[in-house]
Image: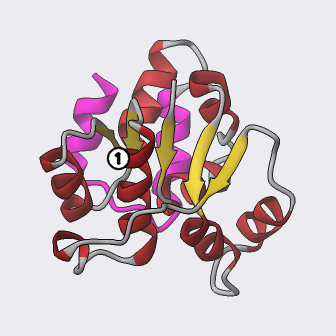
Amino acid sequence: MIVVADTSQINYLLLIGEIEILTKMYGTVVIPYAVREELLRSSAPEIVRNWMSKPPIWLEVRTPTNAPDASLATLDRGERDAILLAGELRADQLIVDDRQGRHVAEKRGILVIGTLGVMREAANLGLLDLPKALKRLEATSFHISPEILARLLK
């Protein structure tokens, strides 16, 4: 299975102590070099920068070979390159939260899932306690509506 991830999922899963669900669910995860750079920015949380400075063996960093087209112009570099890479690799899934990025990826025929979807699947596989993980996620800067939270917990 080929899975490409954008920045936010790695960031938030690290912040809530659940990053290992990615390798347990997908084996190897691919990120574009632009996402690596975003995770190493001085504005990123220290835990994220430290983790990315010594990434695990299951994380593969790649650079897309295709140049971005006009449909990607409004996306940030990490999302743009993640979509390009997912297309080039014919990824089974792209993990992205940004609504516009999801829309663009879906228009290209790329199957997308977000942080919450990954967490729900991990909970269904018995890899995490969803109520506890969501509580930790709420303590971060992640935005989740009360309605979506209630639906996830049902």
Q: Where is residue 86 in the image (x, y as percent from the top left)?
A: 40, 46
Q: Is residue 140 left or right of residue 147?
A: right
Residue 128 in view: no
Q: Where is residue 19 in the image (x, y as percent from the top left)?
A: 66, 42
Q: Where is residue 93 in the image (x, y as percent from the top left)?
A: 39, 35
For the residue marked with disc 1, what is the amino acid? Answer: Gly
Residue 138 in the image: above or below residue 21:
below
Residue drawn at (45%, 14%) of the image:
124
Q: Could you tell me which secondary element the residue under label 1 belongs to?
A: helix
Most foreground residue, 109 or 11 = 109
Q: Label 1: which residue?
A: 87
Residue 28: image quadrant is top right
Q: Is residue 107 left or right of residue 38?
A: left
Residue drawn at (42%, 76%) of the image:
77
Most foreground residue, 129 or 30 = 30
Determine if the magenta segment contains residue 93: no
Most foreground residue, 63 or 75 = 63
| Colouring convention used in this rendered image of the protein | secondary structure
Region in magenta: 130-154
Q: In this view, does 148 lie to the left or right of 42?
A: left
Q: Is the magenta stretch mostly helix, strand or loop?
A: helix
Determine if the magenta segment contains residue 131: yes
* Label 1 crowd bin: few (<14), some (14–19), many (20+), radius 10 Å: many
